[in-house]
Amino acid sequence: MKLEYTLIQKSKRNSARLGKVKYGDKEYPTPMFMPVGTNATVKTLSPEEVKETGTGICLANTYHLWLKPGEDVVNKAGGLHKFMNYDGPILTDSGGFQVFSLANAKDITEEGVKFKNFENGDTLFLTPEKSIEIQNKLDSDIAMSFDECPPASANHDYMQKSIERTIRWAARGKAVHSNPNQMLFGIVQGGYFEDLRKYSAEKTVEIGFDGYAIGGVANDHESKEHVFEEFAFSTKYLPEDKLRYAMGIGDPIDLIEGVIRGVDLFDCVSPTRLARHGHAYTMKGKINLKNSKYKEDFTPIEDDCDCYACQHYTKAYIKHLISCDETFGARLLSIHNIRFLHRLMANIRDNIKTDTLEEYRDKFVREYYGDNYEIK
């Protein structure tokens, strides 16, 4: 079965959109946050726990699954859904982000990218066709085009050449895409440059995809304002009836500002990565449960949170687990952090309905970041 997206409502004050994704007999509202399951698992959590947080779409990583266990093994298992026992929608990235972090500039050619296998040092070569072939076999519900992800500091000339190559790669990938149940997304690049974002978006839309992603926004940036500008520079040139996905975005304010600028989907490893380091999201800001002040704090992480961790355990107990390096502590914080982002997205959707998202943003910023955070 193939995902179907429906746009339901648009804000009259900004570019925020309310929609839904239909998957068989299930429907999931957008905008939404998507947890990352790099190795076909969201770290420390079972698929049942992931679903109980309110997750719709989750991610798996093409690059890592290509190396272990290999796309053919997953294919023989019946595809990712059966392999990882997840019955919701699954998105796979192209593998490009990992490849470009491992490759040298001289190893990026028109044909593809040569790089070292981080597992054993072997030389590997990934092409747009190979990336799509792997994702076809993984049988995810959304596959991503193979693109170059240049650094945020790249100059206009390099970014222009990179975009041109990415557009050619997108067309090559689409030409070999052969999974009829799988959406294929194109990716818009262009760094800080609005003219390049416009060009990349328009040329990618000309090729024609089931949805569109905004790439390069999770790279090293000098300021959040640049990230927010890149959202706007990209979405304004994308079709209204297709999903828009900001890759690698998970900071709470980035989610709100992204939605205001027309983004529907977000993903990031941050909720589980922060959990493994003892950090928890709350509506009053992030807290670090390694701190000694929580040793005798017998209250939940957040009083009004409905997640499993908050319903059954205290900060003191979770601090104890984290201090003892017990995996259960990371599990509880992962459950809470993912649920927090889903609750945040539900609040965002509610405020799109009433066209009060900017007021909600201002209130959230004051409570989460404090009075010293400047609202842009």
Image (spheres, rainbow, N blue to C red):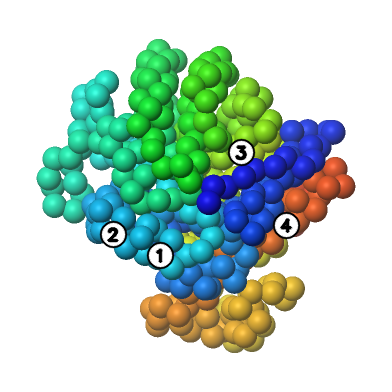
Check disc 4 and give the amino acid type: Ala
* Cα distance in 3D space between marks 3 and 1: 26 Å
Q: Amino acid at mark 1?
A: Lys
- Identified by mark 2, the residue type is Lys
Residue corresponding to mark 1: 82
Q: Nearer the viewer, residue 180 or 163?
A: 180
Q: Position of residue 125 (x, y in %)?
A: 20, 36
* Front position in the image: 89 or 187: 89
State the residue position of label 2.
Answer: 76
Relative placement, left or right, of 14 versus 317 is right
For the residues labelled 4 and 2, say whether their Cβ atoms are less than 8 Å apart: no
Q: Are marks 1 and 4 in contact (CB under 8 Å)?
A: no
x and y, in percent, of residue 285 in the image: 65, 60
Question: Mark 4 highlights which residue?
Answer: 346
Farthest residue to the right: give it. 354
Mark 3: amino acid:
Leu
Does the rendering let one see residue 285? no
Which of the two discs, 3 and 1, labels the residue nearer the N terminus?
1
Disc 2/disc 3 C-alpha distance (Å): 30 Å
Sequence order check: which comes first, mark 1 or mark 4? 1
The quarter holding residue 294 reads bottom right
User: Which numbered disc covers residue 331?
Assistant: none
When asked about the image quadrant of residue 244, the answer is top right
Tag in front: 3 or 4: 3
User: Disc 3 and disc 4: Cα gap in Å?
Assistant: 18 Å
